[in-house]
Image (cartoon, grey):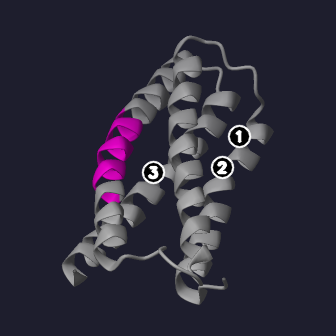
Amino acid sequence: MLYVKAFHIVFIASWFAGLFYLPRIFVNLAMETHQPSVERLLLMGRKLYRFMTILMIPALVLGIWLWLGYGIGKGPGNGWMHAKLAIVILLVGYHHACGSILKKFEHGQNKRSHKWFRVFNEVPVLMMIAAVILVVVKPF
């Protein structure tokens, strides 16, 4: 099970790298007016989103394996796991929201400012902090 846990951490960290970087591409797309630069940023965004999705899948599968293997979250005193699972669901939603935003940029339909995307970019940071605290501290 330690190998499963190790690979889970590797895939989570890799997936988060994409969750941190793709919204930065959105910030630049929202500011950019030079068409060749826009096309380059869109290409980067598409490739990154595809790679993030590939990383997300084993991260989730390994997480489920750990959850089932350890029986974590069953019984009293495991409220931290339910809270962490809620964060995971929110992160998967954030991931898909990034895909939707990317499609809007591809179709020239973005209506949000670069300032909005700077705030949007902080969401996975806050979720990661909360998840790590829940897993390490197990506050409830």
- CB under 8 Å between callouts 2 and 1? yes
Horizontal side, residue 16 vs residue 30: left or right: left
Q: Quadrant of residue 115?
A: top right
Q: Is residue 32 above or below residue 130?
A: above
Q: Which residue is mark 2?
A: 121
Other residues around mark 1 within 10 Å, as few (<14) / some (14–19) / many (≥20):
some
Residue type, mark 3 in image: Gly
- On residue 18, the disc is 3
Say if 109 sits above or below 2 in the image. above
Mark 3 → mark 1, Cα distance in angstroms: 15 Å
Q: Secondary structure at mark 1?
A: helix
Classify mark 2: helix, strand or loop: loop
**Where residue 8 appears, x then y in whole percent?**
32, 68
Please check the rendered image and state whether residue 56 is part of the magenta-colored stretch, yes or no: yes
Quarter assignment of residue 98: top right
Please say whether residue 113 is one of the residues in the magenta stretch: no
Please tell me whether mark 3 sits on a helix, a strand or a loop. Answer: helix
Q: Position of residue 19 (x, y in %)?
A: 51, 51
Q: Quadrant of the N terminus?
A: bottom left
